[in-house]
Image (cartoon, helix red, strand yellow):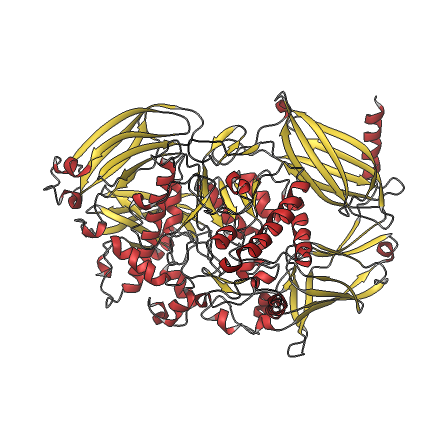
């Protein structure tokens, strides 16, 4: 038996007989008061926040109902104190080091223990650790966390800054109905409002709070990353163990690392005699070589398994029974951001495990506008499962929100959802003075160490749109451009990137902004003259005046990281947050109040009327129709735009644009019920867009592009890593008044791996005229194309369609569509729903306003007289009869609207 093995066995026996470092959780029931005594001894919950607590005490009503955001504007203007008593035992105080650990304080707070200030916070995104050994006593103790108004603090900081120069913008657009100077503070930027969300600038202890005690040290972070050996046969598991500093300044002990692989465990034991480095960190760096045969490779969703392996790290005090344990999960994979030269510009795509991957997904805004509610595991799981089940393989955690919970990233690891992680700076200029930068450094150190080990986290971006805001003079910076550029580079490059590179040992992937021109931005000194150039990097694209159903309007970027259109949440959902049904009239005060995007309603109306015929405004069902039609335009626009980006994955146009390798639409989720770009409502209910993602993000799609010469170009796009041979594409033409196609032809092709294939070009108007769709000038109004792909008799793509004319100008019929049966087919609350129609029906939409769940598909076309879809209920013990009674059905030409 080797000496090392003896040491391992001895240490295992030693650990089984001792206790871990002492942790005393201080969460649970607290009390709350307002600083001036207006409210005292209110019940509070920690982790929590002021809005949740005031709602629970019936001081305020449901903030998401009616005009709750306006009615509670007084809340964040006051100072609030959270307090409680707790008991400490002698064993805790006998330890050499006793700390109060606060995982998240929102945002400005002074912390008192037994009447003495022990620390303060100034950043929502930092973990604070305060030495409280000398302030605690055996028995009863008191703690107070005194929060300052974020509105008042941000205003005071802005006033101080203005004596030097303004850091714009001072306030959001008036349509946001928000608060000013959020860019002065390190807090969720969207909490002061956004064009999709309300202003709820919460305060509170939004994450865990506890007392820790130890003699020698405790494990603060395990930060891992995985690389390959030079010969490619081994994984190199690199990890830094960050240990808590102690009063001696030197940490002595034993570190034991255990990696649990497929069939074996690998254990290594090291003696530690570590001194704090120049960054006030005590860190031990380790590399473990692991044969690739011992693990399965981690792949993104749709490409393989997402296996994770436990790395268990134990720190033991050599002179006592004290030890501390931390576990992280490792996914073995490589990630590259490839920016190779082309004749014009550079590529911009992700290689994972050596394979180019087209990134399909969305942008995630905060799980909830109240940060403590954003920790809810049920909500998080529903969101990420929706993304996973819709073939998404990437989500961008947007820079105006929060670094999400540990559970969020854990689940992304498990589901194979790659994360593009922004640092929390968005749509503004920011300070770069020493005090502000030191605050940001604390944030970067904590968050990168916390997130770096996740297999899902692939790329970090310095900010959202701030390079573009600077260059395009969004906020009047042009007259002092050099000053603001210097601030920009100092903050994102000299501070954030420098610290990021240090922590990741220069192995992390960082871009300075989104959008940016990638490597060209770097060569341009980190501020390009044209951020978002389609020949480089990533692009954000929004256009609310051109026809979104015309794919010729869209750019051809290397990577589309933001694009979107607005729609309204369902009528049934909105009805739950108003006092009277008249509030749901499209032009009502309430609907205007909820629309935070300037000219948003006018833009929605314009885009609807470009392609669809709204009923007369005097119709009693006008609001229902408008809401429904907004979701049709929303879903179909994003479908058309996404398919456009996918078509260009393997080709270039005559401008050198193309090789597009990513499509992340704006946005996945919502924080209240209001007009927004989301595919999922705040209630968790899917809009039509979310149902459409299941098709336009499918691994293989067939899609049509009607070019400016009115030639229909039909493509099959495959994201698979292997070829698919001998597939049959069906191109059918239907008249609007018949279930029988007037024309049908088949094209047989072989699909290359990861390739977009042009399989057929059709001179549309002549083609339709020749197929009895009418005279040349009207044929496009009488017929449409229906596309599908099979292999060996089985469909391998979702069916698709192309309308050669605007729907409003086409000969669309008014069918009679109805539900003919509802049956329960599974003990897991799955029901089949059969629908019948007497004519081709467009955008058939099923809804259950009462029973939560999702349909297998929705907003679909019917080109046959019957169709069966499936409903997965989230509620148990629902009979088919009960479900049937709650179901509603509508479609484009529903007679109730006209």
As drawn, which residue projects farthest toward the left? 775
* Quadrant for the N terminus in the image: top right
Would you say 772 lies left or right of 162 here? left
Looking at the rendered structure, the number of numbered marks drawn on it comes to 0
Q: Nearer the viewer, residue 380 or 355?
A: 355
Q: Report the residue at 51% width, 56% height from top.
A: 427
One can see residue 264 in this view = no
Would you say 724 lies left or right of 774 here? right
Would you say 602 lies left or right of 614 here? right
As drawn, which residue projects farthest toward the right? 319
One can see residue 766 in this view = yes
Rendered view: 147 above or below 609 = below
Would you say 387 lies left or right of 502 here? left
Residue 12: percent from the left, percent from the top? 80, 34
Residue 310: percent from the left, percent from the top? 67, 35
Residue 861: percent from the left, percent from the top? 27, 45
Residue 568: percent from the left, percent from the top? 37, 59
Q: Quadrant of residue 697?
A: top left
Rendered view: 805 above or below 230 = below
* Quadrant for the C terminus in the image: bottom left
């Amino acid at each position: 038996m080797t000496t090392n093995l003896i040491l391992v066995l001895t240490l295992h026996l030693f650990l089984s007989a001792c206790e871990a470092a002492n942790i005393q959780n201080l969460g649970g029931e607290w009390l709350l008061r307002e600083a001036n005594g207006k409210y005292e001894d209110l019940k509070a919950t920690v982790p929590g926040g002021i809005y949740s607590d005031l709602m629970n005490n019936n001081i305020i009503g449901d903030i998401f109902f009616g005009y709750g955001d306006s009615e509670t504007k007084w809340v964040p203007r006051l100072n609030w104190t959270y307090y409680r008593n707790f008991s400490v035992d002698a064993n805790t105080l006998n330890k050499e080091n006793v700390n109060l650990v606060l995982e998240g304080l929102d945002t400005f707070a002074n912390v008192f223990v037994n009447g003495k200030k022990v620390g303060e916070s100034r950043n929502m995104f930092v973990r604070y650790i305060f030495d409280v050994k000398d302030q605690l006593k055996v028995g009863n103790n008191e703690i107070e966390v005194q929060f300052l108004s974020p509105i008042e603090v941000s205003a005071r900081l802005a006033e101080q800054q203005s004596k030097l120069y303004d850091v714009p913008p001072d306030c959001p657009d008036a349509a946001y109905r928000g608060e000013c100077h959020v860019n002065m503070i390190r807090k969720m930027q969207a909490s002061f409002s956004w064009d999709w969300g309300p202003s709820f600038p919460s305060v509170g202890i939004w994450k865990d709070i506890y007392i820790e005690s130890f003699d020698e040290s405790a494990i603060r972070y395990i930060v891992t990353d995985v690389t390959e050996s030079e010969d490619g046969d081994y994984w190199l598991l690199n990890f830094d163990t960050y240990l808590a500093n102690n009063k001696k300044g030197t940490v002595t002990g034993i570190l034991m690392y255990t990696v649990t692989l497929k069939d074996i465990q690998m254990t290594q034991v090291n003696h530690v005699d570590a001194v704090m480095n120049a960054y006030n960190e005590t860190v031990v760096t380790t590399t473990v070589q692991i044969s690739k045969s011992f693990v399965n490779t981690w792949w993104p969703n749709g490409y393989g398994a997402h296996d994770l392996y436990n790395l268990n790290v134990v720190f033991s005090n050599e002179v006592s029974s004290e030890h501390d344990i931390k576990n992280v999960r490792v996914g073995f994979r490589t990630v590259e951001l490839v920016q190779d030269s082309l004749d014009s510009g550079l590529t911009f795509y992700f290689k994972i495990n050596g394979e180019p991957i087209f990134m399909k997904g969305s942008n995630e805004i905060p799980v909830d506008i109240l940060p403590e509610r954003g920790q809810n595991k049920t909500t998080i799981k529903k969101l990420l499962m929706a993304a996973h089940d819709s073939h998404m393989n990437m989500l961008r955690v947007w820079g105006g929100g929060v670094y999400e919970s540990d559970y969020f990233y854990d689940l992304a690891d498990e589901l194979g959802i790659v994360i593009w992680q922004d640092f929390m700076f968005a749509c503004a200029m920011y300070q770069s003075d020493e005090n502000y930068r030191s605050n940001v450094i604390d944030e970067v150190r904590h968050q990168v160490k916390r997130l770096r080990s996740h297999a899902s986290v692939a790329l970090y971006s310095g900010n959202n749109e701030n390079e573009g805001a600077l260059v395009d003079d969004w906020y009047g910076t042009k007259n002092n451009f050099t000053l603001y550029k210097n601030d920009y580079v100092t903050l994102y490059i000299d501070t954030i990137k420098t610290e990021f590179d240090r922590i990741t040992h220069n192995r992390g992937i960082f871009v300075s902004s989104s959008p940016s021109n990638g490597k060209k931005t770097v060569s341009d000194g980190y501020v390009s003259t044209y951020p978002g150039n389609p020949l480089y990097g990533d692009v954000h694209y929004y256009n609310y005046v051109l026809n979104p159903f015309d794919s010729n309007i869209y750019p051809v970027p290397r990577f589309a990281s933001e694009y979107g259109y607005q729609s309204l949440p369902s009528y049934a959902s909105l009805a739950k947050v108003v006092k009277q049904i008249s509030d749901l009239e499209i032009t009502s005060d309430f609907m205007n109040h909820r629309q935070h995007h300037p000219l948003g309603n006018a833009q929605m109306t314009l885009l609807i009327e470009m392609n669809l015929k709204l009923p007369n405004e005097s119709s009693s069902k006008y609001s229902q129709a408008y809401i429904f039609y907004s979701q049709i335009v929303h879903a179909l626009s994003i479908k058309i735009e996404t398919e456009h980006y996918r078509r260009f994955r393997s080709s270039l146009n005559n401008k050198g644009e193309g090789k597009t390798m990513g499509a992340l639409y704006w946005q996945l989720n919502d924080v209240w019920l209001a007009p927004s770009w989301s595919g999922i409502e705040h209630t968790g209910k899917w809009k039509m867009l979310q149902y459409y993602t299941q098709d336009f993000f499918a691994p293989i799609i067939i899609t049509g592009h009607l070019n400016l010469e009115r030639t229909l170009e039909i493509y099959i796009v495959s994201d698979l890593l292997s070829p698919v041979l001998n597939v049959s594409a069906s191109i059918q033409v239907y008249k609007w008044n018949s279930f029988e196609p007037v024309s049908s032809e088949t094209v047989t092709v072989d699909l290359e791996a990861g390739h977009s294939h042009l399989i057929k070009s059709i001179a549309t108007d002549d083609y339709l005229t020749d197929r009895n769709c009418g005279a040349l000038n009207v044929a496009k109004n009488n017929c449409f194309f229906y596309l599908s792909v099979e292999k060996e008799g089985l469909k391998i793509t979702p069916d698709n369609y192309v309308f050669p004319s605007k729907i409003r100008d086409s000969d669309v019929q008014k069918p009679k569509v109805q539900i003919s049966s509802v049956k329960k087919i599974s003990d897991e609350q799955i029901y089949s729903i059969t629908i019948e129609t007497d004519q081709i029906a467009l955008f058939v939409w099923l809804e259950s306003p009462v029973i939560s769940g999702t349909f297998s598909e929705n907003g679909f076309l019917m080109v046959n007289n019957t169709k069966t879809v499936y409903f997965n209920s989230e509620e148990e013990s629902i009979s088919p009869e009960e479900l049937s009674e709650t179901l509603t059905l509508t479609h484009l030409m529903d007679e109730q609207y006209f």
